[in-house]
């Protein structure tokens, strides 16, 4: 089995690949490679899209890699391979993002990425640090996890889905904030599993074992 971490210049690329490599070795879940080769992406058994920075910059980064977006669509949407988006990689699954203007996303899960506006003016933007996950689903990627487990967040924008059922977990940050989205073979996490210690590694291991 091969898990491909998409290389498009994302800042957390290597740390995500290292965390995945650790859990893959422990569970004998095959190899983890970093690539922007469309052929490699189409052949991969699982795909991970990391992301750090602004929505528009990350989308441009994807578009700058010839054939990558088409290969992602073929592998994920047509072939149904398991997909994990992390932080901005998760946000790119949206219909559009409004950071520094309105920009189209991949439109895989209907919704919009908008600026955080906590009800409590004392809460800082970006949200930076640990927050308690509130799980809404018995999704396989949550196996061995429970509400109250912590994820590590760094973000100023958040995903508002068109369909409430696409939100699999949330956190409270001056109001409810989407933490995990998903449908079919797609999963996306706003927090950083590669920085979330045991909870993050468990989620990554569950993703590698997931058979949607």
Image (cartoon, rainbow, N blue to C red):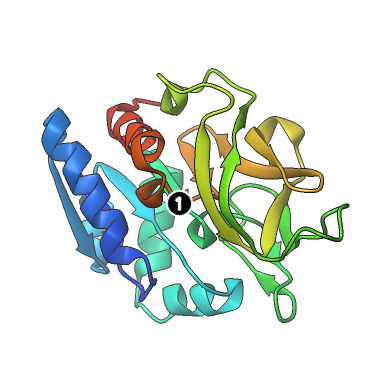
Quadrant (top left, top right, bottom left, bottom right) of the N terminus? top left
Secondary element at tag 1: loop
At 17% from the left and 56% from the top, the residue drawn is 33
In this rendering, is residue 160 above or below 134? below
* Residue 81, image x, y percentages: 35, 40
At 29% from the left and 43% from the top, the residue drawn is 46
Residue 129 in view: yes
* Residue 209, image x, y percentages: 28, 27
- The answer to whether residue 96 is left or right of residue 15 is right
User: Where is mark 1, residue-wise?
Assistant: 192
Quadrant (top left, top right, bottom left, bottom right) of the C terminus? top left
At 74% from the left and 47% from the top, the residue drawn is 173
Depth check, front residue: 98 or 143:
143
In this rendering, is residue 150 above or below 110? above
Rendered image quadrant of residue 73: bottom left
Rendered image quadrant of residue 54: bottom right
Depth check, front residue: 158 or 171:
171
At 39% from the left and 71% from the top, the residue drawn is 10
* Residue 177, image x, y percentages: 72, 45
């Amino acid at each position: 089995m091969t898990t491909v971490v998409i290389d498009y210049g994302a800042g957390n690329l290597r740390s995500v690949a290292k965390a995945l490599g650790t859990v893959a070795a422990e569970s004998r879940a095959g190899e983890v490679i970093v690539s922007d080769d469309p052929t490699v992406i189409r052949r991969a058994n699982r795909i991970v899209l990391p992301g750090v920075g602004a929505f528009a910059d990350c989308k441009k980064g994807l578009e700058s890699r010839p054939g990558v977006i088409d290969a992602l669509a073929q592998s994920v949407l047509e072939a149904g391979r398991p997909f994990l988006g992390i932080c901005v990689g998760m946000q790119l699954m949206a219909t559009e993002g409004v950071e520094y203007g309105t920009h189209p996303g991949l439109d895989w899960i209907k919704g919009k990425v908008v600026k955080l506006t906590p009800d409590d003016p004392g809460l800082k933007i970006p949200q930076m640090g640990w927050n308690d996950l509130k799980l809404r689903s018995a999704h396989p990627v949550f196996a061995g996890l429970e509400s109250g487990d912590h994820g590590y967040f760094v973000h100023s924008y958040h995903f508002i889905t068109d369909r409430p059922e696409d939100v699999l977990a949330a956190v409270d940050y001056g109001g409810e904030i989407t933490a995990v989205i998903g449908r079919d073979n797609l999963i996306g996490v706003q927090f950083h599993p590669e920085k979330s210690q045991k909870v993050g590694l468990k989620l990554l291991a569950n993703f590698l074992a997931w058979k949607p």
